[in-house]
Image (tube, rainbow, N blue to C red):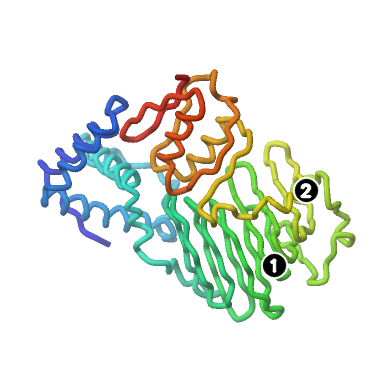
């Protein structure tokens, strides 16, 4: 693990500057000037990078059995000086994320060894995408803010989509089943290309080619399973955790609150994993839903502080890597004004 000895004056200055940057009153230009001024300070930069390495090591301890075994133990008392130091660390971590440094991503893909084999972890930062070629020939695309665990052995191919969104083009290998854990459910792939999006409280799956089976963890699935054998309909709703088949042109949306899975066909013009093209398309969708989607790709959070524009219908094509242009487009085409701060964008009626 990296060692870290805080330089009192620099650490204090860093914490004070970060606090100012994260202040609700700092406008974008003022925040940028303050940040750039600090980057010109070499001792500050060294302190910042050392602290980043420490935080990366702390993050990597998350899978330590020793750490997990004491996670529920009562916390010892913290001195006032210790509290002030770690408060500064928390502020520094916040700025690291705002900068999009993603230091934990740069620490490599290997996660840990298990009795079953090696587990690799792939991550993407906010607003970034990543193409992954697995050793079995499967191609994976990860969307913004996603995490994927991969374990490939001689007998099986087991993946876990921890969070976010991914597109899979799976190489067929009858000798090694391909499964994707998405929480309480598992996707068993029967040779296909499809997209999965895991959000809090919902999971969306859309099949572009071939077919898949979605079932409860630990529930066996036959290679020759069919929709009729499972008793599921091509269109309609099923109770949560039902076993069902999705074939080309079909999608499912699991809703945790409703306790149901809605099955439907999507239009041929609707592209699975459209984000892979770097574009997002909206057709008369409420501003609230548009902003919710844009926030998945934006380093700055976009907030709506005017209830009168929440349901404003929005249409257009937006580039994922130009959220700033999208916001300006909203101002030009709709009755919207954007106020820019260093850490957020606030939308209101013009």
The residue lying at 78 percent from left, 66 percent from top is 221
Q: Nearer the viewer, residue 106 or 291?
A: 291
State whether residue 143 is above or below residue 193. above
Which quadrant does the N terminus fall into? Answer: bottom left
Q: Where 98 sits versus 111, above or below?
A: above
- Which residue is at the front of the view, 60 or 193? 193
Q: Which mark is residue 263?
A: 2
| Few, some or many residues within 10 Å of mark 1 (<14, 14–19, 20+) | some
Horizontal arrangement in the rendering, residue 3 relative to residue 188 (left or right): left
CB under 8 Å between discs 2 and 1: no
User: Circle 1 is placed at which residue position?
Assistant: 192
User: Which residue occupies the foreground of this view, 164 or 286?
Assistant: 286
Q: Earlier in the sequence, mark 2 or mark 1?
A: 1
**Residue 119 spot, x, y in % from top left:** 50, 69
Q: Is residue 69 visible?
A: no
Crowding at dot 2, Cα within 10 Å, few <14 / some 14-19 / many 20+, comes out as: many
């Amino acid at each position: 693990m990296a060692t870290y000895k805080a330089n009192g004056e620099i650490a204090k200055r860093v914490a004070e500057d970060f606090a100012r940057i994260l202040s609700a009153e700092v406008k974008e230009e003022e925040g940028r000037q303050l940040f750039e001024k600090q980057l010109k300070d070499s001792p500050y930069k060294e302190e910042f990078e050392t602290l980043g390495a420490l935080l990366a090591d702390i993050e990597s301890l998350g899978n330590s059995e020793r750490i997990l075994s004491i996670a529920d133990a009562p916390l010892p008392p913290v001195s006032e000086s210790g509290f002030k130091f770690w408060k500064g660390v928390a502020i520094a971590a916040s700025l690291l994320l705002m900068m999009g440094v993603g230091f934990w991503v740069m620490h490599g893909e290997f996660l840990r060894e298990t009795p079953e084999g090696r587990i690799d972890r792939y991550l993407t930062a906010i607003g970034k995408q990543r193409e992954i070629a697995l050793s079995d020939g499967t191609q994976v695309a990860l969307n913004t803010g996603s995490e994927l665990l991969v374990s490939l052995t001689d007998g099986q191919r087991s993946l876990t989509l921890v969070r976010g969104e991914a597109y899979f083009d799976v190489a067929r290998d009858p000798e090694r089943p391909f499964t994707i854990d998405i929480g309480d459910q598992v996707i068993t792939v029967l040779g296909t290309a499809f997209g999965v999006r895991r959000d809090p409280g919902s999971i969306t799956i859309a099949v572009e080619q071939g077919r898949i089976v979605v079932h409860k963890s630990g529930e066996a699935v036959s290679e020759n399973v069919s929709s009729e054998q499972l008793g599921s309909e091509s269109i309609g709703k099923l109770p949560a955790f039902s076993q069902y088949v999705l074939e080309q042109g079909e999608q499912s949306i699991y809703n945790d609150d409703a306790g149901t899975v809605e099955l439907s066909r999507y239009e041929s013009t609707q592209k699975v994993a459209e984000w892979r093209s770097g574009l997002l398309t909206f057709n008369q969708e409420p501003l609230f839903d548009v902003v919710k989607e844009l926030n998945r790709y934006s380093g700055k959070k976009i907030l709506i502080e005017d209830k009168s524009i929440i349901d404003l219908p929005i249409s257009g094509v937006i580039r994922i890597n130009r959220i700033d242009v999208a916001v300006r487009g909203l101002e030009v085409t709709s009755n919207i004004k954007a106020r820019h701060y260093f850490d957020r964008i606030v939308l209101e009626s013009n």
